[in-house]
Amino acid sequence: MDMRDRLTALLARILQDGKPAAAFIQAVNGQFDIVITGPVGKTGKPDQETRKAIGQLARDASVNRISWRAHLDDTAEIISEISPPRAHFGDLDVILPPLAFLQPTQAGENALVGAVMELLPPTGKFADLFSGCGTFTGPMLERGAVDAYESVGSAVRALDKAKGSRPLKALRRDLFLNPLRRDEANRYDAIVFDPPRAGAQAQVRMLASSRAPILVGVSCNPATFARDARILVDGGYRLDSVRVVDQFTWSHHVELVAAFTKRSR
């Protein structure tokens, strides 16, 4: 019986009759992390009795951590944590926050990381834009110092906690509202950017005018990637390669990794 089947009966103990709720289930290396969104218990919020029931649910279903939020835009509150889920990105051992953004499959992640690393120089100073919890940051650290930029505070804190003595700076920054400036981009030997489906239009406009010699773009939306790639090419970059990774099972969606180099004037 898989986790979804087990949860059906167990969630009935804590959800309100007739009220919609959702359970986000994430599996990481055999660890399970669940975030419940919607009304729970008698009052709609986790009271003492509901918290006890959620703790029992975690033990009965062998779930590492269960969090709750009333609405999709709310921050998830950890209710029960037997042990926090962890992920390894290169040598980084990251304690994942609830709702951490991860690649959907390990095989897909390996393919993307491998493709990105093939395009980076053997040594240098790097930037990882839209870094999440460090999918690319960790492997990049094996080649030099990395500045990881991410808007989600919990992801930044997780990276900062995991860095140890490594040359990593985890920086909280909304790259849609405050993109990396040209003078900042010029500091790096290579820049990786992996934006959400909306792409990185504001950010690539800044990158297009920079002197960063190598840009590596990762995208889950070929349409917004094409728009952003056009901006970079018009700004003086050459699109050298595009590798497509089919990692979204039973879906027409694909992921891609592209290499850009600055053309000499």
Image (cartoon, rainbow, N blue to C red):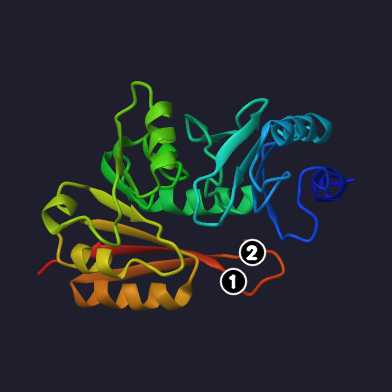
Q: On residue 90, which mark appears?
A: none
Tell whether 21 sits left or right of 195. right
Type of amino acid under label 2:
Phe
The numbered mark, 2 or 1, whose residue comes first in the sequence reads: 2
User: What residue is shown with label 1?
Assistant: 253
Q: Residue at x 38, y 39 (%)?
A: 156
Which of 63/116 is in front?
63
Residue 218 in the image, given as x and y percentages of width and height: 43, 60
* Quarter where residue 34 is shown: top right
In the depicted structure, whether residue 125 falls above or below residue 244: above
Q: Is residue 7 left or right of residue 125?
A: right
Q: Residue at x 46, y 42 (%)?
A: 133
Residue at 43 percent of width and 40 percent of height: 154
Residue located at (84% from left, 46% from top): 2
Tell me the CA gap for discs 2 and 1: 6 Å
Q: Taking 125 as reference, is 264 above or below it?
A: below
Towards the viewer: 185 or 174: 174
Residue annotated with mark 2:
248
Position of residue 250 relative to residue 167, above or below, is: below
Q: Position of residue 38 (x, y in %)?
A: 65, 54
In the shown orientation, is residue 176 left or right of residue 23?
left
Q: Secondary structure at mark 1?
A: loop
